Amino acid sequence: MFKRVLVANRGEIALRVIRACKELGVEAVAVYSTADTDSMHVQLANSAICIGPGPSAQSYLKMEAIISAAEIANVDAIHPGYGFLSENPKFAKICESCKIKFIGPSAEVIAMMGDKSTAKATATRAGVPVTPGSKDIVRTEKEAIQIAEEMGYPVMIKATAGGGGRGMRPALNEASLKNGFNAARAEAEACFGNPDVYIEKFIVNPHHIEFQIVADSHGNVVHLGERDCSLQRRNQKIIEECPSPILTPELRKRMGDASVQLCKEIGYENCGTIEYLVDDDGNFYFMEMNTRIQVEHPITEEVHGCDLIKEQIRIAAGLPISEHVLNSQPRHHAIECRINAEDPYNNFAPSPGRLNFFYAPGGRGVRVDTHVYTGYEVPPYYDSMIAKLIVTGATRDIAIARMTRALSEFKVEGIKTTIPFQDDIIKNSDFRSGNYNIGWVEKFLAMQPNTKR
C-alpha cells in the first residue's frame, strides 16, 4: 500500500478521497487554489500545498504545479478525482515518467477511450452495440450535411474530446445542423482545445444508463450494476438512482456482460463507467466510457455495500479487488441529488457567495458528501456543486419518501440552490412511476410557472 497520496482535486471529491486514504492508513496531501483556502478538504488533509490562483487554468489544471507539489510532498501516488486532469492522458504519462503512480488506468487506455470516435470503434470490435454514426471525424459543414441526410434526421453532433455535455448539439434539420456544427466545434475548442466533432443518430428521449466497472491487475473484472442518469438538463445530471426503474433482469445482464467484455478488450484497470442510451424497446447503444470515478458513484456504494475510492487506491497499489466487492450483490435502492449553487427558476444562473447558514439533513439512510459549512464562501471559478445528498431505502418507494424528507431538512441560506427544484421533481408523479427520460426535465421546466429558461 502507498504511504502518501496527493489528491489533485478540490471540493467534496477531494474530501472523499482524503477520507478513503485515512481509512487505508495512507497519508493524504491536499492541493488548493487561493480561492479554496477555507475549503474543508484543505483542513482535513494531513498536509496541504497551495498551487496557484483561483482560476482552474492557473491551479487545478496546471500540471507542472501539481507535479511540483507531489515532489515536494514526496508522494507515492496521485488521485485525480473527477474532472480537471482525471482523464488527461498527458498528465497520466507525466506521472508515470516521474515515478508517481496515477490512480487510474494507463495513459494509453485514457487516450483510447477519451477520443469518442476511437472509443466507438473499440466498442464495435468488442461486440457492444453502438449508435449509428459517422466513421471518422467530420471536418466540414458540407460533409456534416451529407452524413446527416444519409443517416436521416434527427442527429447529434458530438465533440470527440468532449465530456460533461460540452460540445454537443442536436440537429433536427439542415438549418439547425449548420448552427449546431459550428457551435459544437467552437465549444469543443474552448473547453478541450480540440474542435473535432463526429455525428451520430439521435435516439429520441432515451434513458441514460451507466454501468459501474471495477477491474484489477490480476484479471478480475466485475460490474456493480447500473445507475439511471436520465434526469438531466442540457446534458448536466441533476438526480440519479440505482438501480434503474426501467431495466429488466435480462437487459441488465446483457448490458453488464457487454460492459465487462469491453473492459477486457481494452485492458482496463481501476474503477470506470460505461455509458449507454436505452430506447423504449430495450435496445441499448454504447455512448462513451468514463475512465475515472463518477460524481454519482455513492449510490452504487450504498446499494452494493462497498467503497469505490478505496478500491481505486487498492487496485492502483497492485492489490486484487476486495472479496466483498467481487462477490457483491445489490440490495436496497439509492437516489442522489446534486445540490448546486444555482437558481433553478432563473435559467440555473450561478449563485456563488457566502453561506450564512448550512444545515445538512441526517437520520437513517441519509448521506451527505460536502466540503462546505456555515460561513463558507462558494467561489465563482468552479463547478457549482456544493453537496451530494444520497438516500438509501429497502425499496424505491422508501428511498423516494426518504429523499423528500431529507430535502425538506436541507437548509442553505445566503445563496440560491437547486433544492426546491429537485424537491418538485421527486414529488412529481412521472418520477415516482419511473416514467421519465433524457428529455423529461426540459418539458418539466417548460410547465413550471414564472420560470426563466
Image (cartoon, rainbow, N blue to C red):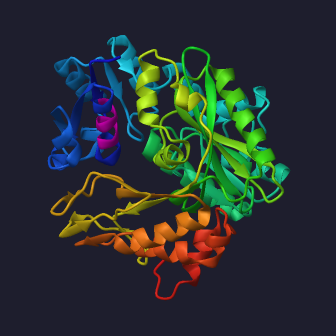
Q: Is residue 18 magenta-colored? A: yes
Which residue is rendered at x = 28% and y = 24% of the image?
26
In the rendering, at what x and y percent does residue 5 appear? 29, 25
Quarter of image, res 42: top left
Q: Is residue 438 magenta-colored? A: no
Which residue is rendered at x = 30% and y = 28% of the image?
63
Quarter of image, res 122: top right
Quarter of image, res 120: top right
Name the chief secondary structure element in magenta.
helix
Which residue is rendered at x = 52% and y = 23% of the image?
321
What count of labels does the image hold?
A: 0
In this view, the residue in front, 327 or 291, is: 327
- Can you see residue 94? no
Is 420 situated left or right of 443 in this image?
left
Q: Is residue 207 above or below residue 61?
A: below
Magenta stretch? 15-21
Q: Is residue 277 above or below residue 349?
A: above
- Can you see residue 229? yes
For the N terminus, the quadrant is top left
Q: Is residue 442 above or below residue 377?
A: below
Is 156 situated left or right of 95 in this image?
right
In the rendering, at what x and y percent does residue 256 appear? 71, 38
In this view, the residue in front, 235 or 149, is: 235
Residue at the limit of the structure toward the bottom, as seen here: 449
In the rendering, at what x and y percent does residue 84 appear? 38, 39
Is 2 situated left or right of 393 in this image?
left
